[in-house]
Image (cartoon, rainbow, N blue to C red):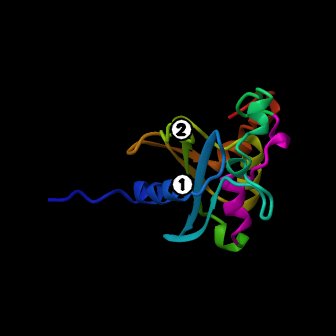
Amino acid sequence: MTVRKSKINYYLDIAQAVAQRGTCLRRNYGAIIVNNDNIVSTGYVGAPRGRKNCCDLQYCQREKMNVPRGERYELCRSVHAEANAIIAAKRDEMMGGTLFLVGIFADSQELVSDSCCCQMCKRMVINAGLEQVIVRNTPEEYTIYNVTDWIENDDSLDGTMGY
């Protein structure tokens, strides 16, 4: 007898497939927004439309400058997966929905475990009206973040860098 995949891992599998379109030389993320069991939009890491991607240039500006993970995003060519998914959706379709997020290391193709949205993406998720963010840690395990916790416990005030 076949065991049916959980709905959360089903959506995380789709987000992981979306991540395969990413163009970052460090980490590629895939995001999907789901509301009422309907996929509202998808997004992956990549340069703005019309600009060259890091994979096309064959270098990462932040890597060349030894910028640590989670810092100096203004130097990054890419738009994050969460931002691209939010940009592609209507707000009324996102309200109360869930964003599923999966990260993959570009070099090893292994999952990025214990990840979360950066401070910029957290702000966008809050304003989009999403209720949860679910992030894959392993092929079967994940972490559920309630967006209201990000509002009530504003970690942008403690000066912590990165994600």
Instruction: Residue 16: give x, y in percent of width and height.
Output: 50, 53
Mark 1 → mark 2, Cα distance in angstroms: 13 Å
> Crowding near pointer 2: few (<14 within 10 Å), some, many (20+)?
some
Between 147 and 160, the residue placed more toward the observer is 160
- Marks 1 and 2: which is nearer the front? 1
Between 18 and 121, the residue placed more toward the observer is 18
Amino acid under disc 2:
Val
Instruction: Residue 86: give x, y in percent of width and height.
Output: 70, 62
**What is the secondary structure assignment of the residue under circle 2?**
loop
Residue bearing mark 2: 112
Residue depicted at x 70% and y 52%: 56
Between 126 and 71, the residue placed more toward the observer is 71
Amino acid under disc 1:
Gln
What is the span of residues highlighted in magenta in the rendered image? 72-89
Q: Is residue 14 magenta?
A: no
Residue bearing mark 1: 20
Q: Quadrant of the C terminus?
A: top right
Say whether disc 1 or disc 2 marks the residue closer to the N-terminus.
1
Residue depicted at x 76% and y 58%: 127
Can the viewer see residue 36? no
Which of the numbered marks, if any, corresponds to residue 98?
none
Instruction: Residue 153: give x, y in percent of width and height.
Output: 71, 37
Residue depicted at x 72% and y 32%: 162
Task: Using the image, determine if residue 4 lies above or below residue 68.
Answer: below
Q: Quadrant of the N terminus?
A: bottom left
